[in-house]
Amino acid sequence: MTKFSVLRTLIVQEVNDLGVRSLGIIIFISFFIGAVVTIQTALNFNNPFIEDSLIGFAARQSIILEFSPTLISIIMAGKVGSYITSSIGTMRVTEQIDALEVMGINSLNYLVFPKIVAMFIYPFLIAISMFVGIGGAYFAGVYGGFLGPEDFFSGLKEEFIPFHIVYAFIKSFVFALILATVPSYHGYYMQGGALEVGKASTTSFVWTSIVIIVANYIITQLLLS
Amino acid sequence: MIKVNHVYKSFGDNHVLNDITAQFQKGITNLVIGQSGSGKSVFLKCLIGLFEPDSGEVYYDDYQYGKLSPKQKRELRKQMGMVFQGGALFDSMTVQENTMFPLRMLNPMSQQEMLKRVDEVLERVNLEGVNQKMPADLSGGMKKRVSIARGIVNYPKYLFCDEPNSGLDPRTSSVIDELIQEITKENNITTIINTHDMNSVFEIGENIIFLKDGILEWKGDRKTIHKCDNENLNNFVYSSNLFKQARKANLKGL
């Protein structure tokens, strides 16, 4: 077993590498997705019998249920997933993993376990994404002249089901496990040289995305239908 | 001491090791020589447990490696040091962190004791003032020395070196050879070196085995290698004119 003090250091480092360093891109993407979703919704609601508050409602539902947990996770499969696969893969081809094994260190435990634990922070990142996304929706909706602030907030509160938040966080937690394990698998078990590290990163992104999308379908079917 | 009895290893139809039996004593430099592709690296990986032999036994002193439980194997591995061909230093760590790594992971030493030990081994491999440098900032020879320092920092009983002087200039290569030999004698450890460097063979080859296509063709030392009549070994060792002339001179007693 890896020493606890070493493990703690590794986990903190991974929280920084995988979580904190992804915050910028998550905030950036979430804000603009929220804004674009609102504009698209507003432009398609041109029936005078549909209330403006529905724009806020639609933005909330799409951001909380799908865009923040799922779309951000697929983007993270590219960012975090490629980072994990290439870093572990490079360690494999340069014999650093063999070096760990020869020292009597469980390399899987040393390399993968801290990443899994660190990804427990992921639902918090998704929560930030939801807030920022709704902020983007407010900005585009209100300052773009599509609806007033009262209508937006009224829509946000309309038919709010708290379980949707639970559902989104359950999804985020499952996606976090996928984001930590699938890329680690592709990095750890790769063979070859530098070229293969690149190929493994691409394969890892594809498979992580596929697993996330399938898991999304299964979780939705189980929890919402 | 490490003893190998009738070890076989294949990858599919490719029979890499065929019936290897050898013994490696402690306190001397044991060399495994052979051309590229002769099975040296696979043999070394079978010894340290990175590959499992298809059949045959590997003994570490009184313990048969294959019969140890996973936990016992990990405990045994803690007594091993390994110098990889490319160094296998951890890119994200400084020289000091790389060298300290086995201590930090495996030893209950305090931080101060670890730092003291790291300074000792870095001084031993003639590397001072580089503690805070990253592996990317080091030359090939320095990387090898850091790798040796990391290999010996945890007082190993067994030291394995996979082509420790490949890619190095002759002077640095010779320094690395001398260093490994000195460390072996100082600490009375069992050292096994994979090499196809003829200078190493003649300088530090106290016990040599020669592999050809996965078969052990010859055993001896640097003194008997001159008188050997194995054709494959002679073709390998005396492939350069310089060594051919040296052999003639040696046989004539010049």
Image (cartoon, coloured by chain):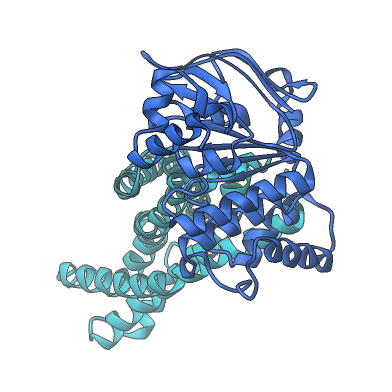
Image quadrant occupied by the N terminus of chain B: top right
Q: Nearer the viewer, residue A187 or B25?
A: B25
Image point 76% across, 39% down: which residue? B157
Q: Nearer the viewer, residue B10 or B69?
A: B10
Q: Nearer the viewer, residue A138 or B137?
A: B137
Left or right of B75 in this view: A43: left
Q: How many marks?
A: 0
Q: Quadrant of residue B49?
A: top right
One can see residue A161 in this view = no
State whether residue B76 is above or below residue A169: above
One can see residue B202 in this view = yes
Q: Position of residue A32 (x, y in %)?
A: 30, 74
Image point 59% across, 31% down: which residue? B223
Q: Position of residue A154 (x, y in %)?
A: 40, 75
Tell me what hue chain B is rendered in: blue
Left or right of B189 in this view: A40: left
State whether residue B159 is above or below residue A55: above
State whether residue A30 is above or below residue B193: below
Tell me what hue chain A is rendered in: cyan
